Image: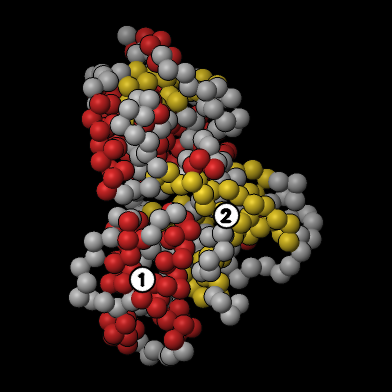
Amino acid sequence: MLHQKKVLIVGAGLSGSTIARVLAENEIKVEIIEKRNHVAGNIFDFVNSNNERIHKYGPHLLHCERSSKALKFLSRFTEWVNYEHKVRALLKNGQTTPLPINKITLEDIFGKKFSNENDVRNFLDSIRNKNLVAKNTDELFEASVGNKLADIFFRPYTRKMWGLDPKKLSISIGARLPVRTDDNVNYFNDNFQALPKYGYTKMIEEMLFHKNIKINLNTNYVRGIESDFDHSFLSIPIDEFFDFKFGKLPYRSIIFEDRKEFSSDLPAPVINFTDNSKYTRKTQWNLLPNSNLKNKDYNTITYEIPCDIKDNPGEYYYPVRTDESNQIFQKYKKVSQELKNITFCGRTGLYKYIDMVPAVLIHLKIANDFLEKISLI
């Protein structure tokens, strides 16, 4: 009988919550345990004493194609506020310039004026190493934009962010930021860009509001608890589950430093630092359109300091994907597939940095594959 199925989900973030909702709607009893004191995982947001909506674990910007199945799913649990994200980079002279690199950025850096996109393309071709077949992130920078732009915008930021020389990082790390030849100053190109009207936390709370879902906060996963369930979906570090038998998988974490600043607004909600300081970026929260009007005369600005996971234990943000770590993960993945009643998920279970919309798509598929396996659909 359908009601006899009982499933454990470890982690009440976007990934676990997506699985939970799909299974609950198919009459499966779902129990979620979450080590933190809140749902929503790393997309958790809240309104502070200054009436600003803060993303506790750094800015999260939703972007996708309007036709996305993930968007259709999420739209059941929230209304949206249109928002096209903008980022600027702080230069040595105190001025800022758009990111991703575009026509305006090139004009700012090189003191030139371009009459059309073809001129921009020709200029980029003249400064980049177009004969280089990139085999790592550093070479991708050189091949895409040349060494001068790489030294300003990418290499210092990447070393801070990842704690590694870009030469040691796979190409996928450096490929996330486009280079444009027009004057588009938006950070993303997708035709749907928005924020949930009442925040991400409210969206997840609506997703988890179902008679077949039980949530336990402030509850750590203990090995063996899965034996009480028909199946378990674990958003936990896969290497930790297997007692690090093949070695530890490296992660980067972030320490967030909140400041009250009595100053004028930043020129964009997010400013990237191009220098060799410890900070990678700062965010002014009340510039996001689903934030409220502040009730005091200061702005909350959050500065981000990347660090190794050992300096911020338990706060996993970015898997460090290198050839060595990929080989280690593949060993864990292989042994995990032998566990018939356990599925690893989320960024620490899949050892993969996943944006929000891809996370929903991946975990919708995981949930539906499970349903198909037990012949419920």
- Residue 252: x and y in percent read 46, 47
- Residue 338: x and y in percent read 23, 22
- Residue 336: x and y in percent read 28, 26
Q: Quadrant of residue 29?
A: top left
Against 187, residue 315 (above or below) is above
Q: Nearer the viewer, mark 1 or mark 2?
A: 2
Q: Is residue 298 visible?
A: yes
Please indicate whether residue 281 sits to the left or right of residue 30 in the image. Answer: right
Q: Quadrant of residue 191?
A: bottom left
Against 154, residue 242 (above or below) is above
Q: In percent of the image, x 57 and y 64: which residue is there?
A: 277
The colour style of the image is: secondary structure
Q: Amino acid at mark 2?
A: Glu
Residue situated in front as seen by the camera: 95 or 244: 244
Q: Is residue 203 visible?
A: no
- Residue 302: x and y in percent read 63, 55
Q: In percent of the image, x 41 and y 10: which residue is there?
A: 228
As helix, strand or loop, the secondary structure at mark 2 comes to strand
Q: Amino acid at mark 1?
A: Val
The answer to whether marks 1 and 2 mark residues whose Cβ atoms lie closer than 8 Å is no
Please indicate whether residue 181 sits to the left or right of residue 157 in the image. Answer: left
Report how far apart the C-alphas of labels 1 and 2 lie in the structure.
Answer: 24 Å
- Mark 2 is surrounded, within 10 Å at the Cα level, by few (under 14), some (14 to 19) or many (20 or more) other residues, namely many
As helix, strand or loop, the secondary structure at mark 1 comes to loop
Q: Which mark is residue 243?
A: none
N-terminal of the pair, mark 1 or mark 2, is 1
Q: Which mark is residue 179?
A: 1
Q: Which residue is under mark 2?
A: 304
Q: In percent of the image, x 72 and y 50: which residue is there?
A: 51
